[in-house]
Amino acid sequence: MPVTDKKILSRLYFIAGGLVLFAGVVLFKLVSIQIVDGDKYRDLAETRTTKMFTIAPNRGNLYSDDGSLLATSVSKYTIRFDAVTVNEKDFKESVKPLSDALAKLFNKESSYYQQILRKARQNKNRYALIARNLDYSDYMAVKQFPLFEKGAFKGGLIVEQITKREHPLGKIAERSVGYERVDENGYRTKVGMEGAFSEYLRGVEGKRLKQKIAKNQWKPIGTDNIIEPKDGYDVYSTIDINIQDIAHHALLKQLEYYKADHGTVIVMETKTGEVKAISNLGQTAEGKYYERLNYAIGESHEPGSTFKLMNLVAALEDKVIDTSTVVDTEKGRWKIYNHYVKDSKAGGYGEITVSKAFEVSSNTAFAKIIHNNYKENPEKYVNRLMSMGIHKELGLPVKGEGTPVIRYPGDKGWSGLSLAQMAYGYEVSLTPLQTLAFYNAIANDGELIKPRLIKEVKEWNKTIKKFDKTVLNPSICSKETANKVQQLLKNVVEKKHGTGHGLYSSNFSMAGKTGTCQKNYVAKDPDKLKYISTFAGYFPADNPKYSCIVVIHEPDKSVGYYGADVSGPVFKSVAQKVYANSPLIDEVDMKELNGEELEKSYQGYYANIQKDHNTVPNLKGLSGMDAVAILENLGIEVEVIGNGKVRRQSITKGTDIKNVKKIVLELS
């Protein structure tokens, strides 16, 4: 054999050997993958083509105290079409009637849906979008359409469900109702009642297996979930939607009139601590108002003269003064070190009793009372405040409660002026709800109750958990002290010299305290100086059913800024309308009423309210409260001037009510 042929043959053997060796390696690898690493790669393939998805449960409903919805979960559905699973015969027979049915439901042309379905069939699309964001009734209708009625495997129907949270009251109480949100990292943001009671509302997630298809999309496998989601419990709040509506609109009206930055109003049931209304409105850049932040619970600020009540209680309990003690107001200016304490009235009030000092809200009188009686032992004063629990948070379940500030002698910021400053509500800090809780305690003869937003948690009609009244301090002061300051709070409104006298009404009683506090005063720039206007109290004055606080920040100084003018009318409006809507029949002492006058007044009101009015009625002689009720039932806006009975009405009787939007009533 020639040498050349031997070389060629050797090369062929070498190549053949190499191929055999390569085939052996491939075979070994295949066996290795199949037997040794088979499970590993099968799992890898599985995870890349199928995946377990969580299904959000229906969140429980949040109700008001009468069962009206504050927040509810609404299911929304997306409909898609798997064009591959449907056989040719069924598709051809059903594409036209299915398109007709879809077009009729969604108000589009049949040709529009025929194009979508045929294109999906042509492109072998297993996830074609048909409709999204459907409510339950539309979803149920789609399920009965031609072809789709055959289900997922024969009809190609793919249904995806999501749950959205809706608030039937809209923007009213939006911040108090709140929300719970989860970001991509699983971090939960909890706001308001939705956040505070999410452990009950949230429910338990379910599981659903999905398969990865073209264009990185995931299609559900089968018709059943691996684990069914469990819906959340229903939570019943203490909110009264009627009082909430009254409070919201009264606050909004005043904020708009005074062009204020923000404000809050809280109404609480005195005996139980149940919060019946809580409204928080802040101004946008466009001058509109919405529920921006929960100021009622989260914003701690200097309370101003509403803190004089706490000081009065402390001084009476320590017996360093009595209500009859006389104080010299020093012509409205009292110098302490290099600082002047000033009264709002030029020239002061002369020598007055502690009672009158409270009623007229004299800064000089209270600064002298607290400074002179506690300067040798300031710890005694602060200890008395702390014994009443003023320095503690209320411990609310809602996140973000503001921290109260009550400095102790020796703390940073304490100075020789601190006692005098704290006497009229500076160098201390409380949230509106913390202030209200104290006023509510006075209305309760000294019993401090924890404000409560939730009554109970239910699963259908079964009670899961009840939230009962919680007493934080059974007695913040003696019954004697409570009775004394109750009378003074009543005098603030009823006496002509009281700072709240402009709110007085002979038709219903109120008790409370005004507060006007400077804001940004440290800057010593008149242009930057702002005000916080407050009114806190309760009603009725003699047998309190509700306590209420109104705080309005940064009203336009050119319009007004005193607490009695800015916040007081909101308090009065709430009290007046709550009286009108919830007459306290069982609390009226009939012995003190003239039976004939009462019957005559009632019969006049009843006769008027029963008439089918097409024209403006004659309201002269009726009580202001009755006249307001009659006009509001007719859909007419009412402005009331004065107190008592109707003396004059701006629109004469007999005028067609179709032409009337507003009537001004003058009372006397």
Image (spheres, rainbow, N blue to C red):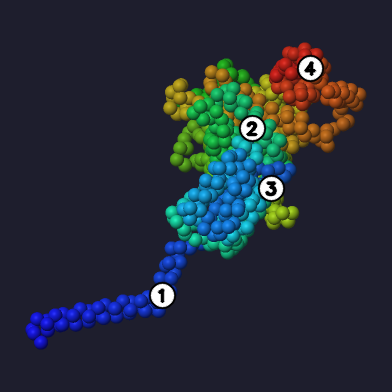
Give the quadrant of residue 543.
top right
Tell me the kind of residue under disc 3: Tyr
- Residue 434 in view (yes/no): no
- Residue beneath the point at 68% across and 21% down: 502
Q: Are marks 2 and 1 in contact (CB under 8 Å)?
A: no
Residue 605 location (% of width, % of height): 84, 24
Q: Nearer the viewer, residue 594 or 311?
A: 594
Looking at the image, tell me whether mark 3 or mark 1 is earlier in sequence order. Answer: 1
In the rendered view, would you say 8 is above or below 503?
below
Tell me the kind of residue under disc 1: Gly
Looking at the image, tell me whether mark 1 or mark 4 is earlier in sequence order. Answer: 1
Mark 3, other Cα within 10 Å: few <14 / some 14–19 / many ≥20: many
Mark 4, other Cα within 10 Å: few <14 / some 14–19 / many ≥20: many
- Residue beneath the point at 33% across and 79% down: 27
Residue 136 location (% of width, % of height): 65, 48
Per the image, the residue denoted by label 3 is 236
Residue 489 location (% of width, % of height): 69, 30
**Measured Cα–Cα span from mark 3 to mark 2:** 20 Å
Discs 1/4, front: 1
Discs 3/4, front: 4
Q: Are marks 4 and 2 in contact (CB under 8 Å)?
A: no
Rendered image: mark on residue 616: 4
- Residue beneath the point at 29% across and 80% down: 24
Mark 1, other Cα within 10 Å: few <14 / some 14–19 / many ≥20: some
Give the quadrant of residue 651.
top right
Farthest residue, direction right: 596
Left or right position of 61 against 162: right
Per the image, the residue denoted by label 2 is 248
Per the image, the residue denoted by label 1 is 38
Looking at the image, tell me whether mark 2 or mark 1 is earlier in sequence order. Answer: 1
Q: Nearer the viewer, residue 227 or 372?
A: 227
